[in-house]
């Protein structure tokens, strides 16, 4: 994932260029354009990514436990037959 600091640096550089030119009004439009592009890219924050990664880890752990339990139950069933 792309670091948000890179976006901030890019935005700051654009602001510097725009503020030193007669196109100072373009700053808002450029920021809106960049934000719109990032929204369309459907990026997620690092925090959201970390939360989803933790959910996935927990789900995998539960699945592993359930698979072990199922194997035990199947073994018990075979012994009874």
Image (spheres, rainbow, N blue to C red):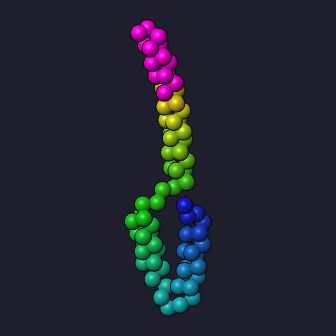
Q: Residue at x 60, y 66 (%)?
A: 5
In the picture, measured across the screen, residue 74 lies left or right of residue 20, that is left
- In the rendered view, tell whether residue 15 sits above or below residue 71: below
- In the rendered view, tell whether residue 51 sits above or below residue 7: above
In the picture, measured across the screen, residue 12 lies left or right of residue 81, that is right
Nearer the observer, 9 or 80: 80
**Span colored in magenta:** 67-81
Q: Residue at x 43, y 13 (%)?
A: 77
Nearer the observer, 29 or 77: 77
Q: Residue at x 48, y 31 (%)?
A: 63
- Residue 74 belongs to magenta span: yes
- In the rendered view, tell whether residue 54 sits above or below residue 44: above
- Residue 49 belongs to magenta span: no
Nearer the observer, 39 or 54: 54
Instruction: Please identify the quadrant where the N terminus is shown.
Output: bottom right
Spot the residue most to the bottom: 22
Measuring from the top left, give residue 19's x and y in whole percent. Answer: 55, 84
Question: Is residue 77 in sight in this rendering?
Answer: yes
In the picture, measured across the screen, residue 25 lies left or right of residue 2, that is left
Q: Residue at x 39, y 65 (%)?
A: 40
Count of marks overlaid on the render: 0
Measuring from the top left, give residue 80's x and y in whole percent. Answer: 43, 8
Measuring from the top left, give residue 62's x and y in whole percent. Answer: 50, 30
């Amino acid at each position: 994932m792309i670091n948000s600091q890179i976006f901030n640096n890019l935005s700051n550089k654009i602001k510097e260029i725009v503020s030193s030119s007669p196109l100072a009004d373009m700053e808002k439009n450029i920021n809106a354009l960049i934000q719109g592009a990032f929204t369309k890219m459907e990026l997620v924050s690092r925090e959201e990514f970390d939360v989803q990664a933790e959910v996935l880890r927990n789900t995998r752990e539960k699945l592993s436990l359930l698979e072990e339990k199922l194997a035990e139950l199947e073994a018990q069933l075979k012994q009874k037959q």
